[in-house]
Amino acid sequence: MIKAIVSIIGKSNSGKTTLIEKMLPVFNERNYRIGTIKHHLHDYESDIRGKDSWRHQNAGARQTMIASPSKLSFFTKTNSELPIDRLADYFDDSDIIITDGYKKGDKPKIEVFRPSHYDIPVAGPDDNLIAYATDAPGFNFNIKVPVLDLNDAACVVEFILDYFKLPRRKQL
């Protein structure tokens, strides 16, 4: 059962994916099962051209699954972008979902902000921002939320666990 959904937001190439990548092993050490959703603003290729599943989709299948003993991939065509809560329905084996993106979504957000990459943060006062993760702790942010060390993934994980009031689990 999903206990929390948090969005990691920021401009392109600000370090969102890198932060998530560093957080995942920390969550795993704390015995949490994490699901991730990558938000993409444009259409993208998700299957290998010419392979059977790709051929099934191109022949008209609305949903296609590839299954093996060690993993599965599920592809479905949609008529419009689905809200995060609908996407979360697919995550039946995750405690926490972290989204990479969804600046305009309604979930709690942590903005990755690096002034060396852009001048001002993207989140506004009505964007459900709960923290900044930055490499510039002295920056004068206009939204008063906690400022986290972008280079300390364990600190960000602890903040998320505290924010959602999630219990500390026995570490693996």
Image: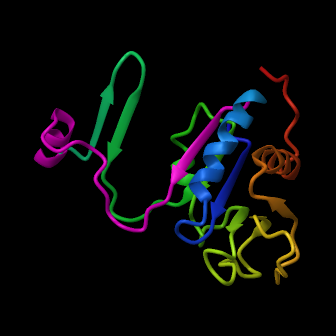
Farthest front residue?
116
| Count of picture labels | 0
Say which quarter of the image contains residue 167.
top right
Q: Residue at x 74, y 42 (%)?
A: 3
Task: Report whether 38 appears left or right of 99.
Answer: left
Residue displayed at 78% across by 45% down: 157
Residue at 39 percent of width and 29 percent of height:
72
The image shows residue 23 at horizontal and vertical percentages of 69, 43
Image vertical order of residue 101 relative to residue 4, above or below: below
Q: Nearer the viewer, residue 132 or 40?
A: 132
Looking at the rendering, the stretch of residues picked out in magenta corresponds to 32-60
Measuring from the top left, give residue 85's x and y in whole percent.
59, 54
Quarter of the figure with the N terminus: top right
Whole-percent x, y for residue 162 in the image: 88, 48
In this view, the residue in front, 113 or 41, is: 113
Q: Is residue 52 magenta?
A: yes
Q: Is residue 55 magenta?
A: yes
Report the quarter where the C terminus lies: top right
- Pick out the residue farthest to the top: 69
The residue at the point 68 percent across, 34 percent down is: 25
Q: Nearer the viewer, residue 157 or 59?
A: 157
118 and 127: which is toward the camera: 118
- Rendered view: 109 above or below 154: below
Q: Could you tell me residue 129's position as x and y percent?
A: 76, 69
Chosen colour scheme: rainbow
The image quadrant of residue 124 is bottom right
Q: Is 147 on the left or on the right of 107, as rendered?
A: right
